């Protein structure tokens, strides 16, 4: 306690400030100090509020570890090499430049109209596809009939003739041809079976409404436009990226124009 009191008094004398203006020091390594504001600086107010006391202590320990290593590098004069000096200077410039860019980016607004206009302009990019299967099927009301039909087809009865003879649904009169169907058109068990069958193969499917023998004989891919609501989140990212790129390019051009002396000799 006396140690911290002495530090506070020293700071008051050194900076000539009143106690209300004292910087809240949370960690120290030799002459290097870490204030609470510095510890909080990488985080938003909301992010900092979510951090526990343990989290904050770990952050302070991380700073101490980094600082003792950096001080050791100074003691060994590693930081005096030209290569490291350049890297340190470049890192400092990167941090400053990123702060400026972040400030410019904070003014970006993406409206609903921006999103919809972008969607209309690039609508041909937002498509989805799904398979449809052209099938034949035979519907029966009991397992015995199903087994009988399977046996007769196995022994040479044409699938189309079997459908006309045994199927208990209207499509049977047409040889069991259903046409192209998608996932939304079929019972889930039948859809699963169709997707597993190779072309021209058939198999049985037991559903809650009865028994089917289904045959898959053609597949096609259906391509449709996505709805705006389906891609709005994706479009927001793309619009934001384009706005950021535009702002960055304009910012660099403006700063270069305002700089009196720029040379390159490589």
Image (spheres, rainbow, N blue to C red):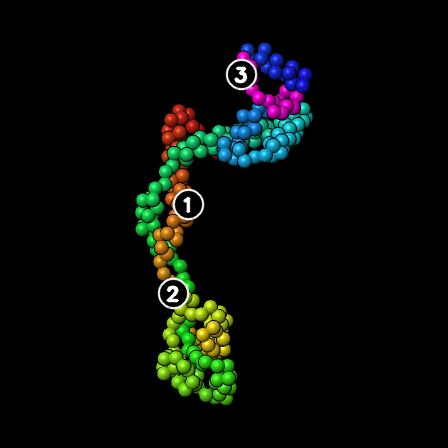
Taking depth in this image into account, of 216 and 98 the one nearest to the observer is 216
Mark 2 vs mark 1, CA separation in Å: 27 Å
Q: Residue at x 48, y 70 (%)?
A: 189
Secondary-structure class at tag 1: helix
222, above or below 257, in the image: below
Taking depth in this image into account, of 192 and 31 the one nearest to the observer is 192
The residue that mark 2 highlights is 222
N-terminal-most mark, 2 or 3: 3
Magenta includes 178?
A: no
Q: Is residue 132 visible?
A: no
Q: How many marks?
A: 3
Q: Horizontally, is 246 left or right of 17 in the view?
A: left
Magenta includes 27?
A: yes
Residue 92 percent across, percent down from the top left? 52, 29
The residue that mark 3 highlights is 20
Taking depth in this image into account, of 61 and 18 the one nearest to the observer is 18
Give the label on residue 237, or none: 1
Give the label on residue 157, or none: none
Q: Which residues are magenta?
A: 17-33
């Amino acid at each position: 306690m006396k140690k911290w009191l002495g530090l506070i008094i020293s700071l008051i004398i050194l900076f000539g400030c009143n106690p209300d203006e004292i910087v809240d020091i949370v960690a120290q390594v030799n002459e290097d100090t870490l204030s609470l504001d510095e510890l909080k600086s990488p985080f938003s107010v909301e992010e900092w509020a979510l951090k526990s006391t343990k989290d904050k202590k770990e952050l302070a320990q991380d700073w101490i570890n980094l600082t003792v290593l950096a001080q050791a590098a100074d003691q060994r004069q590693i930081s005096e090499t030209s290569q490291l000096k350049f890297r340190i200077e470049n890192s400092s410039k990167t941090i400053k430049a990123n702060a400026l860019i972040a400030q410019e980016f904070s003014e970006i607004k993406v409206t609903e109209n921006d999103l919809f206009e972008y969607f209309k302009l690039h609508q041909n990019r937002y498509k989805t596809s799904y398979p449809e299967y052209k099938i034949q099927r035979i519907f029966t009301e009991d397992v015995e009939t199903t087994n009988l039909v399977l046996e007769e087809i196995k022994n040479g009865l044409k699938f189309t003739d079997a459908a006309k003879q045994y199927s208990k649904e209207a499509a049977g009169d047409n040889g069991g041809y259903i046409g192209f169907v998608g996932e939304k058109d079929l019972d889930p068990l039948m859809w699963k079976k169709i997707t597993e069958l190779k072309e021209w193969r058939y198999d049985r499917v037991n559903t809650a409404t009865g028994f089917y023998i289904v045959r898959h004989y053609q597949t096609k891919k259906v391509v449709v436009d996505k709805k705006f609501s389906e891609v709005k989140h994706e479009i927001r990212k793309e619009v934001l990226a384009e706005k950021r790129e535009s702002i960055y390019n304009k910012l660099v051009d403006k700063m270069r124009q305002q700089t009196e002396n720029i040379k390159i000799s490589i």
